[in-house]
């Protein structure tokens, strides 16, 4: 039993204990000070004049204790967040947990984090808690709009108790629609900073009017700093990974370049050895195929395979004429570079063997174990250059040999040279001409003579000599030369796409044969015949009658038969046909009539008509000889031109 000093009331110990506990509960915020304390103070005998001041102190102590409790909870959350920063390396998880803690600690309805794009000035929502609108989760805030832009610009926390009353110039329809969809009224946003650089903004929003206090702003700022660390670390890691990837790629490129350079050095060394030891184009193709681990083919300019290495499909040569391949080859010939065609093609690249305007051949590359890099491409170009040099070298050797052969041919066809001496000189040069007795005379257009000479040299088989003499091409040899004449004529005509005339004089004295062939060729040229294969025997009598100027032949025929031809063309007559029959039938009107299946009177009438056009003296010996010669030449020209046309067809 306790008695108060006034002696008016006595309380026991249990009541004192209960009253003291109630005051402690009030201090700890577990009781309402206004509702509970008057009774407890009365039990404890607190004078009336002191109760108000004591009640205020107890109330303030309770508020402070609650603040400390809240602060402890916030610090605990910040400690947990900091510990996670060190323990978790997934930026997305860390940001999500920071947004969760802000949502719980501020007790907001909606919390979200917007990342800032410094390049565009936009902010886009990255993490949200409490959102009910899918549009809000995809929200992008344009530069200068919304509360977010003001936070970015001022780099400090900013709040508003009523968003719709916020600065009007900051409003934007897309943002306002998203805010309305979420029912947001009050908002607080704080920046995520790293060395004055804004990385983003953390927002808490409440769907009623609410005024955020200083402690809430401080708490959200601390969490924003944590989020800044996460984003900055993530960006640094991303940059490091990018740098690592770049370094890895650079190392891979360097390694590949070193491998390509090693291959290039190996190819270069082997090519030089091949050239110095007399290796030909086959060796170049083999080296390139081995070092580049892919099939390689060398084709001539007509698309024919010269040599190959590796496994090639038989269909590859048919691709030669395709437009992409032809265009790539032309580009390669003009630039000297290797031209890639693509890894999906049977022919993956080409490199031309060329020198100036000359085109020798082309290297075709197929699919391999690795792609052709820049260094490998230069290796192919070097191989093509070596191939071109080999072509030029072979041509130089062949040219010297052809010059020697040309000297022999000139001596053989010269009428003033000693045959035995010519044979002996040729023997010393390694050429056996002891059995040579046949010649083929070839006539091609002057502008194509050089090309025809190179082509003819390639086509001429062993045992025959092919050369140029006095503007014409000749094949000299044994009787085999005549046997080869048609093949040579046909192949030259096809290759040059032009008319080629081959003349075969009689075998025997080569100098006389060349003179005869020259006269007959000149005769045929005068008649307009420039294509075909002819023997000199049937034309030699006519050729002997005319001077070297072949224009005289046409003038001779025109003077003799021009009047009859014009009459037939104008009147639709057959005077020229009748005259031809008359000449072929011994100048007998009766035999001429039988040959034409006419009555003899009809033939006589036509002969009288010819008299009126040519004059009666045409039947006398000398005029008749010239006229019959013109008839035979004209008819021969007509037949030869018909045969030449058939040959072209």
Image (spheres, rainbow, N blue to C red):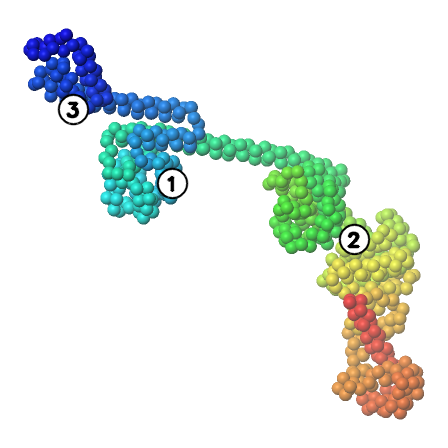
Q: Would you name the residue on which mark 3 appears?
A: 34
Secondary element at image label 1: helix
Residue drawn at (17%, 13%) of the image: 15
Residue drawn at (82%, 64%) of the image: 502
Report the residue that reaches farthest toward the top. Answer: 1
- The mark nearer the N terminus, 3 or 1, is 3
Q: Which mark is residue 137?
A: 1
Q: Position of residue 242 (x, y in %)?
A: 48, 34
Q: Which mark is residue 96?
A: none
Total number of numbered labels?
3
- Tag nearer the camera, 1 or 2: 1
- Which residue occupies the foreground of this view, 456 or 602? 602
Q: Position of residue 268 (x, y in %)?
A: 67, 37
- Which residue occupies the foreground of this view, 478 or 35? 35
Q: Is residue 153 visible?
A: no
Q: CA distance from mark 2 to mark 3?
A: 123 Å
For label 2, the crowd category at 10 Å Cα-Cα, with few meaning under 14, some 14 to 19 and many 20 or more, is few
Q: Do labels 1 and 2 touch, CB within 8 Å?
A: no
**Left or right: where does residue 332 sit relative to residue 224?**
right
Q: CA distance from mark 3 to mark 1?
A: 46 Å
Q: Which mark is residue 458?
A: 2
Q: CA distance from mark 1 to mark 2?
A: 80 Å
């Amino acid at each position: 039993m306790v008695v108060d000093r006034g002696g008016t009331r006595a309380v026991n110990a249990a009541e004192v204990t209960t009253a003291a506990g109630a005051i402690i509960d009030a201090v700890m915020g577990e009781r309402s000070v206004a509702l509970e304390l008057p009774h407890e103070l009365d039990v404890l005998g607190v004078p009336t004049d002191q109760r108000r001041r004591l009640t205020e102190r107890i109330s303030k102590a309770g508020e402070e204790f609650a603040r400390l409790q809240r602060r402890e909870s916030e610090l605990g959350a910040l400690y947990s967040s900091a510990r996670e920063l060190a323990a978790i390396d997934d930026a997305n998880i860390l940001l999500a947990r920071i947004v969760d803690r802000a949502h719980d600690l501020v007790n907001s309805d909606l919390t979200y984090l917007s990342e800032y794009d410094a390049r565009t000035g936009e902010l886009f929502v990255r993490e949200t808690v409490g959102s009910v609108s899918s549009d809000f989760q995809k929200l992008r805030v344009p530069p200068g709009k919304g509360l977010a832009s003001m936070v970015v610009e001022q780099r400090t926390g900013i709040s508003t108790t009523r968003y719709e009353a916020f600065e009007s110039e900051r409003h934007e329809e897309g943002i306002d629609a998203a805010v309305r969809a979420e029912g947001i009224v009050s908002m607080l946003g704080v920046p995520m900073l790293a060395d004055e650089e804004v990385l983003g903004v953390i927002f808490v929003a409440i769907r009623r009017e609410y005024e955020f206090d200083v402690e809430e702003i401080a708490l959200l700022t601390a969490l924003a700093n944590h989020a800044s660390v996460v984003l900055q670390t993530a960006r640094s890691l991303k940059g490091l990974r990018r740098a690592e990837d770049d370094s890895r790629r650079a190392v891979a490129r360097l390694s590949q370049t070193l491998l390509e350079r090693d291959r290039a050095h190996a190819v270069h060394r082997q090519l030089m050895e091949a050239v110095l030891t007399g290796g030909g184009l086959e060796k170049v193709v083999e080296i390139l195929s081995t070092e580049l681990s892919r099939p390689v083919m060398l084709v001539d300019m007509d698309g024919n395979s010269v040599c190959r290495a590796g496994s090639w499909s038989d269909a590859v040569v048919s691709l030669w004429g395709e437009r992409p391949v032809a265009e790539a080859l032309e580009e390669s010939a003009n630039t000297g570079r290797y031209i890639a065609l693509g890894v999906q093609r049977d022919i993956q690249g080409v490199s031309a063997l060329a020198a100036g305007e000359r085109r020798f051949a082309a290297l075709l590359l197929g699919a391999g174990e690795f792609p052709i890099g820049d260094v490998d491409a230069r290796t192919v170009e070097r191989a093509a250059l070596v191939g071109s040099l080999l072509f030029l070298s072979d041509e130089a050797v062949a040219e010297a040999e052809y010059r020697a052969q040309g000297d022999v041919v000139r001596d053989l066809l010269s009428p003033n040279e000693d045959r035995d001496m010519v044979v002996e000189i040729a023997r010393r040069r390694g050429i056996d001409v002891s059995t040579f007795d046949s010649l083929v005379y070839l006539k091609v257009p002057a502008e194509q003579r050089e090309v025809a000479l190179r082509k003819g040299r390639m086509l001429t088989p062993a045992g025959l000599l092919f050369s140029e003499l006095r503007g014409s091409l000749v094949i000299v040899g044994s009787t085999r030369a005549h046997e080869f004449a048609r093949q040579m004529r046909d192949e030259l005509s096809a290759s040059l796409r032009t008319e080629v005339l081959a003349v075969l004089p009689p075998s025997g004295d080569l100098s006389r044969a060349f003179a005869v062939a020259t006269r007959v060729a000149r005769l045929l040229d005068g008649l307009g015949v420039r294509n075909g294969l002819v023997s000199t025997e049937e034309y030699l009598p006519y050729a002997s009658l005319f001077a070297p100027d072949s224009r005289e032949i046409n003038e001779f025929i025109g003077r003799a038969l021009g009047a009859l031809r014009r009459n037939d063309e104008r009147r639709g007559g057959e005077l020229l046909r009748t005259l031809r029959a008359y000449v072929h039938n011994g100048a007998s009107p009766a035999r001429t009539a039988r040959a034409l299946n006419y009555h003899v009177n009809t033939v006589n009438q036509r002969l009288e008509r010819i008299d009126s056009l040519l004059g009666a003296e045409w039947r006398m010996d000398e005029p008749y000889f010239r006229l019959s010669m013109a008839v035979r030449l004209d008819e021969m020209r007509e037949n030869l031109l018909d045969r030449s046309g058939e040959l072209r067809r």
